[in-house]
Amino acid sequence: MRLSPAVIAAAIFSLTLSAGAIAAPPGASPTPNPGEGAAQAERGNGVMGQFTGLGGDPALGEALYQTKCASCHDNPTGRTPPKETIANNAPTFIVSAMLEGVMRPMASGLSPHDMASVAAYLSKRQDGGLGAGALEAPACTDKPAAMRLTGPTWNGWGNAATQARFQPDPGLAVADIPKLKLKWAMAYAGSRNGQASVVGGRLFLTSTSGAIYALSARTGCAYWRYDIPGGSRSSITIGKISGGRAGARYAAYFTGWTERTAYALDAETGQLIWKRQVTDQQEVQMTGSPVLHAGRLYIPVSSAEEAIATDDKYQCCKFRGEVVAVDAATGKVIWRSYMADPPKTFKTNLKGARMYGPAGAAIWGAPTVDAKRGLIYVATGDSYTDIDVPLAEAVVALDIRTGAIRWANQLTKGDNYIIGCYPPNVRANCPSPAGPDYDFGVSPILHTLKSGQQLILVGQKSSQVYALDPDAKGKVVWQRRLSRGGPLGGVEFGPAADGDNYYVGIADIFIPAPKPGLYAFRIADGALLWSTPSEALACAWKAPYCNGAISQAVTAIPGAVFAGAMNGRFRAYDSQTGKVLWAYDTAAAPVTTVSGRSATGGVIDGAGPTVAGGIVYVTSGYQGRSGQPGMVLMAFSVDGR
């Protein structure tokens, strides 16, 4: 079934982090690899699969190109790329340019299938893969240093398996922060992105355009670019690999956004080591980053059904939150654990479509490893239907060896939700009553106090933050609530923790009495230490996303916390007082990128800043909400050196 472009644009691509829910755990099961063989790939991924840039009709694409594109690209002037240059890009990259990039105005009125058809006609790289170089950055002329895991590093989502988002050795002092200046910038296509991972002098980056980059961390030149169908939103984890492709010593691990796959690339050359489809479920989107531990990759699975179910004819809903463990050397699936029982039909909606349940339990954030207890922790989102999902909006502990669910604490009950369930246009698939959409969209943080006691820290879109006891099946030790929260409210992508404090950004878009800003809690007892509200500031774009919401994941270093806001401001805060130490407006004026072109940032959201080797990296322009095409990765260093 295909949705109208209007529904898709309004639903899927306005779906920021509308995390799903978790259902009753049937436990884990060893399974064969679902991605082996061409038949699996041909089954696609429902509506989400239309955004891969694959499956288009080249004949239709040629006709549309002649009507919409040929007048400019067959006779290019200025910076308009010729047809031959466009053809060197993979289909997903071309679709991204039409969907949310510079070609969006010209592609107005085209359906996803139309865009895929144009891409199928134009692209000479139907299989994606490793290209000759990145058009977005000049090729590096120096030989890269030998790859190693030591040295200035930010590796993966939380910079450690405990997901604290803390950099203990940032390469700059708090006193240096007011002297930060832009060192280099790269503009790249896509609507969303993973965050920068820095390992071995290289910066690794993903985007929903399908482009995967390895850049010089100091200069921004490109070592390689690999293209995948369907794009990626995960952050890249680098690890040693053995038993894989001949000659590969280190692998770059990540997941595809819409194609239900995990990848391992040779981190030094960009060559494919393995690719594996890891789930058979439909309408999957992979937002949480995979986690590497002891030779296994742990992969969270989330869903777009919350948005797709706004189509009254859609048979809502069948998705079940899922964690998949694969062998890091080969990609072979070792176990999978679902967060809900298999769905069954239980009624028809008002438009006659069958409804299914239980459903939901999407896992939006990276798993957290507890090696001492032999567990991994995930936080889950809401339920999609009226059928009870006992693990919805819960913190769940799984056995790291088998995937069996060891314990779970459901922190919010009865939150059944899809998009479009409030007047005046209530959708036929809406549960009754519709819940407030209080997903957990974050990675739990496993924190060790000075006393040796450990706590699990987690934040919710209700704006509540919790400390749980891992030795008492997740019993609540303390909790605090900061505002009303809601679908785009409360805690969105990820807090951070240092040795003593827990730092939480609050978004609060589209809710009464919003309280956006940055908050700090003492981890030992949950005391609120300080709060710094976001100011109402002017933007280069209009409301509603000219807003001080801190939805982006935050990052801590000794003495400071970095956080970006939807109004494009990127700030550093004193970790003891909340005082703003430094601020930069990423969208105030164009910057010159490493390609020599100018680009402007926009809304800051999603994956957070990273710090390594004295450089602070952040991406501005998330989801095109500011009207700016694409995104800009910015690197800041002391005096820009």
Image (cartoon, rainbow, N blue to C red):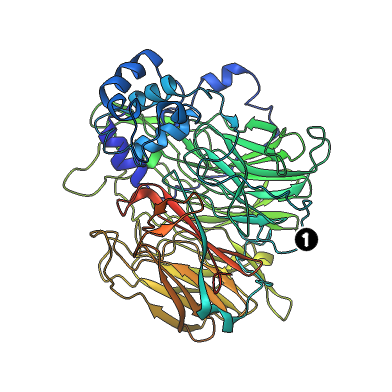
Front residue (pair 68, 193) = 68
Name the residue furthest left: 424
Q: Position of residue 263 (x, y in %)?
A: 64, 37
In the image, residue 461 lies at what x, y percent?
A: 41, 61
Query: Could you say which is closer to the camera, residue 402 or residue 91?
Result: 91
> In front: 323, or 541?
541
Q: Is residue 328 visible?
A: yes
Please tell me which residue is depicted at 54% across the width and 70% down the height of the picture.
Answer: 640
Residue drawn at 45 percent across, 20 percent down: 55
Above/below status of 206 relative to 394: above
Residue 95 in percent (x, y) is at: 40, 32
Q: Is residue 494 left or right of residue 191?
A: right
Report crowding for label 1: few under 14, some 14 to 19, many 20 or more residues within 10 A (C-alpha).
few
Taking 289 as reference, is 480 above or below it? Answer: below
> Does 406 sit left or right of 314 as displayed?
right
Under circle 1, the secondary element is loop
Q: Residue 324: x percent and y percent?
A: 64, 40
Query: Which amino acid, by three-letter code, is at mark 1?
Result: Thr
The C terminus - image quarter = bottom right
| Position of residue 75 in the picture relative to residue 301 (left or right) | left
The residue furthest top is 59
Residue where numbered disc 1 is placed: 150
Q: Hey, which quadrant is residue 279 in on the image?
A: top right
Asked whether the viewer can see residue 403, the reply is no
Q: Nearer the viewer, residue 641 or 13?
A: 641
241 is higher (above) or lower (below) than 458 = above
Q: Is residue 371 left or right of residue 350?
A: right
